[in-house]
Image (cartoon, grey):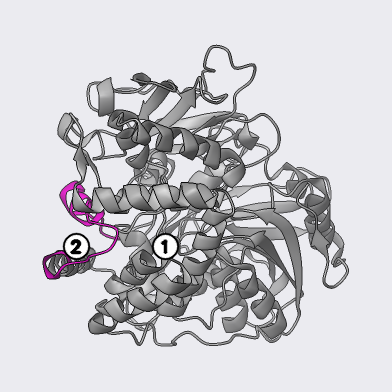
Amino acid sequence: MDRGLYCGNGGRTAQAMCGDRDQGVAGGCGSTVQGTAGTYAIAATGGGNKNDGGRGAGGASIAMSGGIEGAGIDCASEQGTGQPQAAGTAVPGSSRPRWVFWCRLQAGPRRATWHRWFGLAATVLSVAAGTCWAAAWAGGSDQSSALSEWSPCAAANGAAGMQCAILNVPLDWNLAESATAQVAVARLPATGAHKLGVIVTNPGGPGISGIDDMAYSGNFWDRLRQDFDIVTFDPRGVGASRPAIALAGDELVAAVRNQPSIPRTEAQRRSRLEGTTRLVDAAQRGGVLGLVGTREVARDLEALRVAMNVESIDYFGFSYGTYLGVVYADMFPGRTHRIVLDSAMNPANDYATLRHDQAVAFDHAIRAQFDAPEIQRIQALIERLDESPVVGEDGRVLSGLRLLNYVESAAYEPETSVPVLREVLAEASRGNWAPVIAAVHGPALLVNPADLPYLSVACHDLSTPTQVGDVAALARAWSREAPLTGASRAWSVLPCTVWPTRAAAPPHRMTAAGSGPTLVIGVAGDPATPPHWGRDLAATLEHGQYLQWAGAGHVAYGRAGEPLGTIVNDFFVSGRLPPAGLELPAD
């Protein structure tokens, strides 16, 4: 699992999780690799070893200067602590910070888009939360009390006034006598004189730390915080919550990610299945499989509502957080006041359906950014790497699967990511592999097929009727609909065909009867949560209304500008909904 670089402070600065400067890629934090199109600034993360590029606690991200306007990262860290430090050194010649690869350094109130639903995304900082936040609760939880007292968070960074607490809940909600799980909780108290209520938020995932997301959010919540407490948490098994979901070790991650994009031979298929089996075995070591599903998290959320002594909550979910919000509203009628779901999924989809729809959407999204000859060159390069991966001087591998995942990741926020992708592809065309390897091993790469926190929830919740033997047939069929991404997305279903746990309630339509009004927001060009999912969900909900932003990429709020911000704020404050069928322009 890649983790490390994370942006926040309202998009003004970057935060990096940096380990020992003597351990990391290309000489550690702040190092550079020279490329013919410019200088590639590397932000190394984590406390791994030189052989794995520091990926024991992270990896590396890449930024470009010269070919495009960019910004560099210079990580600062106390040796071995893994504590996040502010960073954001501008590259010479850049008038203001922009992006460090997948990390926004652009001035203004926009927010880094780490919200994601089932993109097999990197779990950004979710495990680092254990070191970031453990000090906030060390010895501070009281087993006799459901919610500990609120106290200032450790390392709260850009989120002024952020407070932390621990919620004690049963590890197994189905047992009368159960061990205790600890759910890490955080809040930004309302700043106005007349608080209207509590908004609980989830940033996406599954597998993302809500607390880290809030810590680096800067002024993102300032507008809503005038009237509401903003509350978030690390879902059970994630971040600072305990017990934790087991993680895949570096060797296993490499074994999974260094594969061809598509297993074309019998030997490659055996290798893919072997890697999948090892992932399942690793996941079971944590002892929490079957106890970290979305319905269990929804029960924790209800326990949090009770512990906060509020009759109902408002809810703001992004990406996977929309699924959690719907499940909660459906399970606990009358406990939600107003709900906003940004980039929603359809809870009726099983995993195979979900991956199929994504395959088509990602293929369309990538083709919208490149012309036909460029697409042909990308496909040829991936196929070349499938046959003959490139091994860097540091031993890291550039495989066809890693490059395809990298290309897919650019579709999450194309306005900033695609220019960088073009530079990296240009380096590949010149045979200058060092910056390409650095890019595909970046810690914020948004597609990661070895993400166990993700798989532990997705495969449990979204049981699929597909069997192992059916995956190859799916790959052939999907490749006709989505030639670039279809077959690879079909093979990504494989772990869920052999996952050892299944949710008691399989995927089904949810009406959330008895819940409050729900505003569902879609993005016209969203590859991770295609907009028809949101439309279908809004039509199914008892009190759902759909709004669409005509932009591209994943998640609208914070990217779609002032009109959407005003609509969301007014809805939470007054309950006023926009006109039915409204579509906001992209510009």
Instruction: Tell me where the magenta segment starts and ends, as one range.
Output: 245-268
Q: Position of residue 254 (x, y in %)?
A: 21, 49
The residue to which callout 2 is attached is 282
Position of 467 with respect to 421 (left or right) is left
Q: Position of residue 409 (x, y in %)?
A: 46, 50
Between 405 and 450, the one nearer to me in the picture: 405
Q: Estimate the spatial distance between the alpha carbons at disc 2 and disc 1, rounded to whole Å.
A: 27 Å
Q: Where is residue 439 in the image (x, y as percent from the top left)?
A: 37, 37
Q: Where is residue 506 in the image (x, y as percent from the top left)?
A: 44, 87
Q: Is mark 1 on a helix, strand or loop?
A: loop
Sequence-wise, the earlier of marks 2 and 1 is 2
The residue to which callout 1 is attached is 485
Q: What element carries label 2?
A: helix
**Residue type, numbered disc 2:** Ala
Between 426 and 195, the one nearer to me in the picture: 426
**Residue type, numbered disc 1:** Thr
Observer able to see residue 42: yes
Between 343 and 526, the one nearer to me in the picture: 526
Question: Total number of numbered labels?
Answer: 2
Asked whether the beta carbons under mark 2 and mark 1 sit within 8 Å of each other, the answer is: no
Measured along the vertical axis of the image, is residue 139 above or below residue 436? Answer: below
**Is residue 255 one of those drawn in magenta?**
yes
Between 360 and 235, the one nearer to me in the picture: 360
Query: Residue drawn 55% across and 71% down?
Result: 323
- Farthest residue to the front: give it: 373
Measured along the vertical axis of the image, is residue 24 above or below residue 486? Answer: above
